[in-house]
Image (spheres, rainbow, N blue to C red):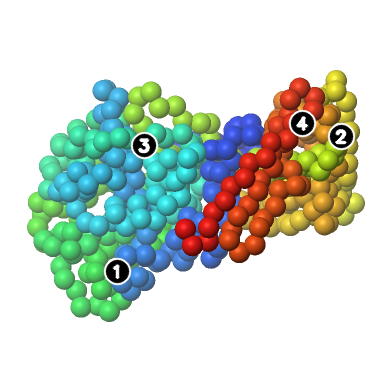
Amino acid sequence: MFRLALLGCFATANAYLWPNPALDQVETILYEILPGTTGIASFVQPCDTFTGTGGTTSGRSNAADWIRTAYHDMATHNVTAGTGGLDASIRFAEEQARAENAGDGFSNTLTVLAGFSTRYVSVADTLALGTVIAVEECGGPQIPYRAGRVDATEANLPGVPQPQDPLQSHIATFAREGFTQTEMISLVACGHTFGGVTHSAFPTIAPALTDPLNTQSVAHFDTTNVHFDNNVATEYISGITQNPLVVGSNDTTNSDKRIFGSDGNVTMQSFANSPDLFASTCATLLARMLDTVPSGVELSDVITPMPVKPTTPIFTLDGDVLKFTGRVRFWNLTANANRVVLLLWDDHHGGVRNSTLLSSLKSSTTYPYGVATSFIFGNSSDAGLSLDAAAGIKTMRFSVDGELQDQGGVGFAVQDGFAFSTTSCFFGNNATAQYDVAVRVLCFYSLAVLTQCRSATA
């Protein structure tokens, strides 16, 4: 399998140019993850976290729900017609009410993940982000992630396979989605390394239990159901699996038994023999699943950590002085006790360059995939850079220990057409504020006063 080699390439590629508000947000969600912090990752740390009824004693996990939701949303895809796919149509009541979408895992998933959608990040993108983060945070491989999914405006046609479907129906369904028989076996195994079958959704498959640590009576697919590993294969091959879709009392609903054995167990045996093969195969197929979108939807390149990423640039006009504040994050800087970091820029007067030392180290934070080192523009008091207002800034670049960082010669475009004025003010407890906005006209600023009044009791 080629996925592990490709991941090395992804780690060094620069997939997009700054500024790009949508991809900037996604990159932060994907790579700036700290255990226990806010954000998508906090809902799968630890991996038995479940935000529905029963919490960690329910027998369920958010990770399993998120992966199942992403697959069911994608499974309406018709590769020939170019319809369906990962487009968040699962959020519509019409789809959730179908027998093929039994259970409350979809609503649970959307309650969490849809809350991370913004004007730049679609609900469909959050479903894909949730899957990637759940797998990676719970012991699985790094999955290449692309952004740009478009949310459906209505429910898609039915098409999710069900446990009672015969083998040929499963093969035909996965072929419609764009997957071969071998890929079907693999993708089912990858998804079923998490979670299980819940009694309330499938009472004829999962029996009611009296386990205080499994209050929702979940019949798990393997013994490590909140952790990514190849036990779904090793337990199946060794004949000790308790997977309810393999050894269930009603053979009609033993869909995993039919699927896994459809090639004489060749694929499952290979996964049982090699955890690395299982991980690399899952990284490939889960990425393909998440990238299955309706025709006409164009996804971004693979999102990787930007080597240099400015954040929150703000211009403030103080008389004839333009102040520029903000931060810049560097990814995986090499150690250097005598580091010299410079900000360089082109202005509106013929591209004259100026430079200033970024002398204030704001933070250095270690994340799962690298270390982020951030500096602020200006000194330790956050006063910012004082510039000639008429000259301003058009494009900026950075120099780290003499090495220029300019996005391959493109630079970092800066929009100084608007600036807040220091004459803006806030008036007491009635929450009345005056915002003065300076607008660049040719090579100078014109000051406009925008007064916004809000009553604290309104």
Residue 445: give its label: 4
Report, in whole angstroms, how far the alpha carbon at label 1 lies from the one at label 4. 57 Å
First in sequence: mark 3 vs mark 1: 1
Amino acid beneath label 3:
Asp
Read off the residue under disc 1.
53
Circle nearer the N terminus (1, 4): 1
Q: Residue 204 at x, y = what percent? A: 11, 61
Query: Can you see residue 131?
Result: no
At mark 4, the secondary structure is strand
Name the residue tied to disc 3.
Answer: 151
Kind of residue indicated by mark 4: Tyr
Which of labels 1 and 2 is toward the front? Answer: 2
Front one among 209 and 440: 440
Residue underneath mark 2: 388
Element assignment for label 2: strand
Residue 445 appearing in the image: yes
Distance (Cα) linking label 2 and label 3 = 45 Å
